[in-house]
Image (spheres, rainbow, N blue to C red):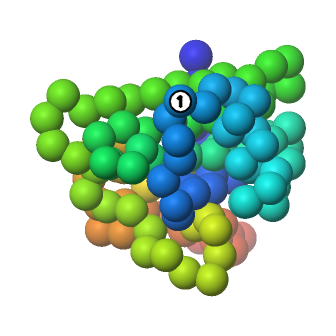
């Protein structure tokens, strides 16, 4: 099972992916379009053209995990807007909100790192 933890680096592909692709095809997208090594441990998130499904690709050190979530009703409404980059980074708590069909931009979480004051 995949557990998303705060230290994980998550990259969302801006352009929709061809969901006929399997692990090898999505790993090629990671290398050629997102310019990231699929073996690096990043969590890669892809959306179908219609927005009804999401695929997650991650390498855990032994092999690849490929997970898919398809909504029975509706679509994933939020997706990063097309910009100069092919991917958009998310925090772990934002990925959980996205997988629940919500808006990750509206999810407010604690910053990933904060200075600890020893006087507290």
Location of the N terminus by quadrant is: top right
**Which residue is painted at 53% across and 30% down in the image?**
20
Query: Which quadrant of the view contains residue 100?
Result: top left
Helix, strand or loop for disc 1: loop
Q: Position of residue 18 (x, y in %)?
A: 53, 41
Q: Position of residue 46 (x, y in %)?
A: 52, 46
Which residue corresponds to mark 1? 20
Q: Is residue 88 left or right of residue 36?
A: left
Location of the C terminus by quadrant is: bottom right
Q: Residue furthest left?
A: 73
Q: How many discs appear?
A: 1
Q: Residues within 10 Å of mark 1 (few under 14, many from 20)?
A: few
Closest to the observer, 101 or 7: 101
**Which residue is painted at 53% across and 63% down in the image?**
14
Q: Is residue 94 left or right of residue 101?
A: right
Q: Position of residue 76 (x, y in %)?
A: 28, 50
In the rendered view, tell whether residue 13 sits above or below residue 27: below
In the rendered view, tell whether residue 31 sits above or below residue 81: above
Q: Does the rendering let one see residue 9?
A: yes
**Which residue is painted at 72% across and 60% down in the image?**
34
Q: Residue furthest bottom?
A: 84
Q: Does the rendering let one see residue 119?
A: no
Q: Is residue 101 left or right of residue 22?
A: left
In the rendered view, tell whether residue 37 sits above or below residue 83: above
**Which residue is painted at 30% across and 68% down in the image?**
106
Q: Position of residue 3 (x, y in %)?
A: 57, 29
């Amino acid at each position: 099972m995949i557990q998303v933890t705060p230290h994980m680096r998550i990259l969302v592909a801006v352009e929709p992916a061809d969901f006929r692709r399997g692990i090898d095809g999505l790993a090629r997208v990671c290398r050629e379009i997102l310019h990231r090594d699929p073996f690096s441990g990043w969590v890669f998130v892809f959306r179908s053209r219609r927005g009804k499904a999401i695929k997650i690709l991650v390498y855990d050190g032994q092999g690849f995990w490929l997970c898919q979530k398809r909504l029975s009703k509706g679509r994933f409404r939020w997706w990063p807007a097309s910009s100069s980059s092919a991917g958009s980074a998310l925090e772990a708590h934002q990925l959980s909100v996205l997988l629940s069909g919500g808006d990750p931009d509206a999810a407010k979480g604690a910053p990933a790192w904060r200075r600890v004051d020893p006087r507290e």
